[in-house]
Image (cartoon, helix red, strand yellow):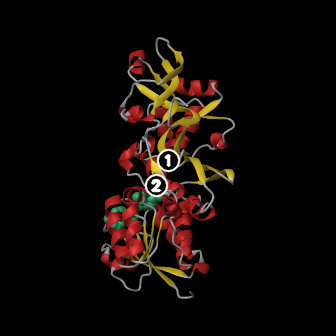
Amino acid sequence: MNKTLNIGLFGYGCVGQGFYEAVNESPNLNAKIKTIVVKTKGKTRDLPVNYFSYKASDILEDAEIDIVVELIDDAAAAYNIVKTALNSRKQVVSANKKMIAHHLDELIQISNKKHTSFLYEASVCASIPIIRTLEDYFKSDQILGFQGICNGTTNYILSRTNLGLNYDKALKEAQELGYAESDPTLDVDGFDAKYKLIILLKHAFGVSPQPDVVFNCGIRHILPEHVEFARQSNCKLKLFSFAQNIDDKVVGFVAPFLVNTQHANFNVENEFNAVHIDAKFAHQQLYLGKGAGGDPTASAVLSDVSALKSQYAYSYKKSKSLNLSFTNNFYLKIYLASQNIKVLDQIPFQKTEQVFNSEKYNYKIGWVNFNTLIGINFNNNLGLFFAVYSGKYRLNIEE
Ligand SMILES: NC(=O)c1ccc[n+]([C@@H]2O[C@H](COP(=O)([O-])OP(=O)(O)OC[C@H]3O[C@@H](n4cnc5c(N)ncnc54)[C@H](OP(=O)(O)O)[C@@H]3O)[C@@H](O)[C@H]2O)c1
């Protein structure tokens, strides 16, 4: 296909500007951005005004536009744009993990019905080509599980707390460096990591749980005592987007993990993202790279546009060939800590392996049913902190 591709771009912020530059510096792509739709009138832009419009229809109803690239920061508006574009038989690229995590199955259905393609590599770990890897390289090999560091903000904060900074100072530093928003909730409470997990679950296992059934616990209540416990156990605390196939059931959640020195993610620090995959025949692999920022995210969008030029579409083979179901009904071993021993005692353990009590800090290590944990709002519970203790998970505690 030698024809110049016409792209309609929604959003000209951090990623949109990076993408504009990437297209201009990729002559081999033979593509041009025809129109850019943004939101705020009167904002100073570094391109001539005739590029910009404030009406979605200027892209969505332009028959000359082949590909719609959606890079806006409003999930509800992004959903309408992507849905309308697919219904109009346009090919679509998006980076909006929140929107995709909520509407993926519906958007896949529309793109199938309209024989068009919807790609979203940038939505998970930006420059790491993890979706395409799961889709294509792992089309036949069976994924046993993955542990993803999918949020650079929390990984940066944990790198700093692991070096002795307290949480508030580490967060402030992350905000000053531009890694964290002034309201950091989506990152530090694990929502962003959860949206990415849901997208990976679809491509690794073919399951698509809705965000409200997937548990996310972040790092907001990490204390120096927890960091010290990890250090003494030869571990670091890392926030994982975690998934595992246990006897043909898929478990998936976001939580802090105690990660030991042998784990490939142990040395993944600062704003970096990494996904560690365990597969039946490939065994273990680590994919590492920059998971955010204008250029790394634009690189993934550019790659999708380039793939669309070759008529690429996700096959969703795991959804079609596997018959796995998502469950929260399993057992795992956790470290649960609180300054108040009574709070710890309220949480039922199936097996308790270790208890530590002191005046200011108490913890238990043992096996709990995950359903017990998901009933507790750890993100809003100042008095409690938990981390996953070991890499063993069971559907039945009697095993
Ligand atoms: N930043 C990253 O590192 C990163 C990494 C991975 C994925 N993403 C995803 O990429 C997307 C864009 O992020 P960003 O960081 O580039 O955001 P951003 O810097 O805040 O820019 C957002 C852009 O969206 C435009 N916009 C907002 N609502 C709109 C609407 N209803 N119609 C048209 N335009 C609208 C804004 O217009 P105005 O310019 O007029 O305000 C602005 O140009 C988000 O989904 C984000 O989750 C970002």
Q: Quadrant of ligand 1?
A: bottom left
> Is the CB of the residue bearing disc 2 within 8 angstroms of ligand 1?
no
Mark 2 touching mark 1, by CB under 8 A?
yes
Image quarter (top left, top right, bottom left or bottom right) of the N terminus: bottom right
Q: Residue at x 52, y 76 (%)?
A: 308
Classify 10 Å Cα crowding around label 1: few (below 14), some (14-19), many (20 and above). many
Q: Quadrant of residue 64?
A: bottom left
Mark linked to residue 365: none
Query: According to the image, label 2 marks what residue?
Result: 207
Q: Secondary structure at mark 1?
A: strand
The amino acid marked with disc number 2 is Val
- Counting the numbered discs, the total is 2
Query: According to the image, label 1 marks what residue?
Result: 250
Q: Nearer the viewer, residue 370 or 274?
A: 370
Q: Secondary structure at mark 2?
A: loop
Tell me if residue 189 comes above or below residue 36 in the rendering: above
Q: Nearer the viewer, residue 155 or 23?
A: 155
